[in-house]
Image (cartoon, rainbow, N blue to C red):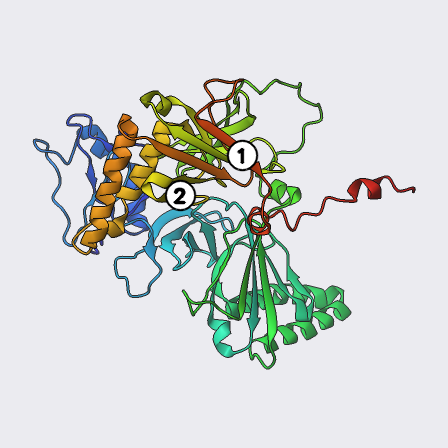
Amino acid sequence: MPELRWRQRLEPAGYGNQDQIIPETGKPCQVRFPEGPESTASLRKGRGGSWRKCRRKGRGHRGSKSRKSAPGSRVVGMSASGAVGPGHLFRPFSAEDEEQQPTEIESLCMNCYRNGMTRLLLTKIPFFREIIVSSFFCEHCGWNNTEIQSAGRIQDQGVRYTLTVRAQEDMNREVVKTDSATTRIPELDFEIPAFSQKGALTTVEGLISRAVSGLEQDQPTRRANEEAMADRIDEFIVKLKELKQVASPFTLIIDDPSGNSFVENPHAPRKDDALVITHYNRTRQQEEILGLQAEAPEEKPEEEDLRNEVLQFNTNCPECNAPAQTNMKLVQIPHFKEVIIMATNCENCGHRTNEVKSGGAVEPLGTRITFHITDPSDMTRDLLKSETCSVEIPELEFELGMAVLGGKFTTLEGMLKDIRELVTKNPFTLGDSSNPGQTEKLQEFSQKLDQILDGDMKAHFVMDDPAGNSYLQNVYAPEDDPEMKVEHYKRTFDQNEELGLNDMKTEGYETGLASPR
């Protein structure tokens, strides 16, 4: 009998979490998977290293009679979560990694309807993302096929790679082309439409060779039916083959609305002068083709009052990329305006984020609020800080610039605590390499800030918002607060430039619309 070789397989992981635990002991099951068609058939029939037999008899734990391991066998431990160890699931793409072995799965051949072998390789492209490379071969009829699939989600934006091929080295650049990508060579007026080919991990030269093979495939049939058409295609094939010699520069454009295609930058992380990467927002038609947006309903839905509702929409966690939900609520602040509060809570990793957006437009004038803190009860005042607002505490010689801490809807006490946490947890002021003088200043600043929070020290709290979208509660409203001063001022040119208002031209639009036809 030929000696069986043993290796890691991932196929039984699909039975689910409960099937991977031995019922008698509650411990993970250790299974050996033999390699080759005979051993795969034995797994299906319940012989050899059968998964079901192991689960039924509880083989592999103390007290049960288990079969001895075959020589050179490799034991794969499966946990309750279905993870396979050791090693990471996605390894960097390298020919020198001996542990990076493909996963073999017996599958049906769609040419002869007998069983062939599919090999899956889970790998990671440097400076890109994870992909799955699959290769199928049928030993009965010789049919073979290769394909790649993105292991990640569809990106938020589409991507367009424009490569100017000037030298032979550019033909060796790695290319990841998904099935949703469109390939164009403007110099030849040549285009490969989306979804006309399966995804591929290849090079620029391989991409051209694949196009040549596709055109040559039906040439015998064309010569029998339309000889003139076949001659023109032969001439075009010659032009495609001449591109491989790079006698003159040409342009290769890969446009992928899913954002999962990739062209290698051999100079990474430095800029590549020959490669231009453009990210763009997808059109409605592209989203429908990718299955991201359903067709518009024929009947108009009934109007709902969403002002008092908490809206929820699906998103991805910025930390672990797991699916999460974001809650959004429109809040009316008394004696001010409407704001939008958004909060995201990830159940997978526990990461939480919250953000406040202004519900209105940029005000005609900027706003500066100066509040004199005189009593501990002032710490309970509501405070809205937009992302364009800066904060200043003159007594502490402290100033917080725009966009720091983002938009917040909190209290005065919460704002001061966020400032203290931001300053004291600066990594450049911690450890043995920090400056002793700077550390003492930070300790003194923290002590004075604690005195303000406890009401032992009076101070001024200044909020300066050029957009006019920040707010501090007036407990005497609608009367004036004797300790709070609100000033409205005209923005400078630089402030309008930071807000992007100098480039906005809104004059004359109504006149143009009202012009006679």
Q: Residue furthest left?
A: 63
Q: Amino acid at mark 1?
A: Glu
Q: Which residue is mark 2?
A: 400
Q: Residue at x 68, y 70 (%)?
A: 188
Callout 1 secondary element:
strand
Which quarter of the figure has residue 325? top left
Asked if residue 513 is positioned above or below residue 483 in the image, the reply reads below
Q: Residues within 10 Å of mark 1 (few under 14, many from 20)?
A: few
Callout 2 secondary element:
strand
Of the two numbered discs 2 and 1 in the rendering, the one whose residue sits closer to the viewer? 1
Q: Residue furthest bottom?
A: 247
Question: Relative to 436, is 318 on the left or the right?
Answer: right
Q: Residues within 10 Å of mark 2 (few under 14, many from 20)?
A: some
Percent position of residue 139, x then y: 41, 57
Point out the image quarter for the C terminus: top right
Question: Relative to 197, is 373 on the left or the right?
Answer: left
Which quarter of the figure has residue 269? bottom left
Q: Residue at x 43, y 36 (%)?
A: 462
Say which of 107 and 440 sits in front.
Answer: 440
Q: Which residue is mark 1?
A: 487
Question: Relative to 282, is 172 on the left or the right?
Answer: left
- Which disc, if any, is residue 245? none
Point out the image quarter for the N terminus: bottom left
Say which of 14 and 223 sits in front.
Answer: 14
Query: In this orientation, does residue 307 appear?
Result: yes
Say which of 345 and 179 sits in front.
Answer: 345
Percent position of residue 158, x then y: 56, 50
Q: Residue at x 51, y 31 (%)?
A: 486
Looking at the image, tell me whether mark 2 or mark 1 is earlier in sequence order: 2
